[in-house]
Amino acid sequence: MANTTRVLLGIAFAFGACAPEQPPSAPGTAAIASAPGTAGREPAPPISAEPAVPSSVTEAVVQQRAPLDGCYTLARASNPNLGRTSIEIAFAIDAQGKPITVDLQYRHRMGDNAKECMRDAALALRFPPSMQGRQTATLAFAPGP
């Protein structure tokens, strides 16, 4: 085992000795390899992990719709005949972007458990502070494939 380790270290040293010498990087910076044909170009801006600020209340709801979709799934579990539907949600949003009250208008009848789920999910949504005040959004639902 010791001989194998020495041989591997010798091979690694030999390859390292054959590699072209790289100029040292400035302290605190990493060397960046450029792709062929990209020398002198500005690097691409970093991709933001945060979603874009929504331009409307409906867009904000759509960006956060997963819990509401779960409530629709709950509604379909208790009523398999529930097909395409929509819900109009009227919000009163405070200065921090948190809903204070929600009023839901259902296009089709849903069970009490699903309605409670929708209300709780709507109250958990967050909006940009610029959307403070009374706002309305309509969200459509459809059964999955």
Image: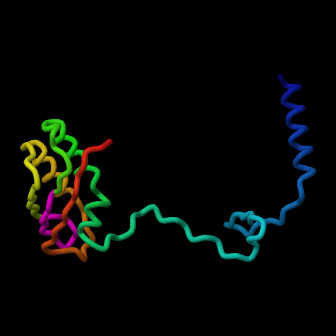
**Quadrant position of the N terminus in the picture:** top right
Residue ID at (92%, 44%): 14
Magenta span has 89?
A: yes
Task: Specify whether 64 is left or right of 22.
Answer: left
User: Image quadrant of residue 41?
Assistant: bottom right
Picture coordinates of residue 101, whole percent (x, y):
9, 63
Q: Which residues are magenta?
A: 87-99
The one nearer the camera, 46 or 145, is 145
Q: Looking at this view, is 7 or 38 the one in front?
A: 38
Visual colour scheme: rainbow
Q: In the depicted view, which residue is nearer to us: 59 or 7? A: 59
In the rendered image, residue 83, in percent from the top left (x then y), is placed at 19, 46
In terms of depth relative to the viewer, which is nearer, 59 or 53? 59
**Quarter of the figure with residue 13:** top right
Say which residue appears at 22% left-offset and 42% top-offset: 73
Image quarter (top left, top right, bottom left or bottom right) of the C terminus: top left
Q: What predominant SS class does the magenta segment belong to?
A: strand
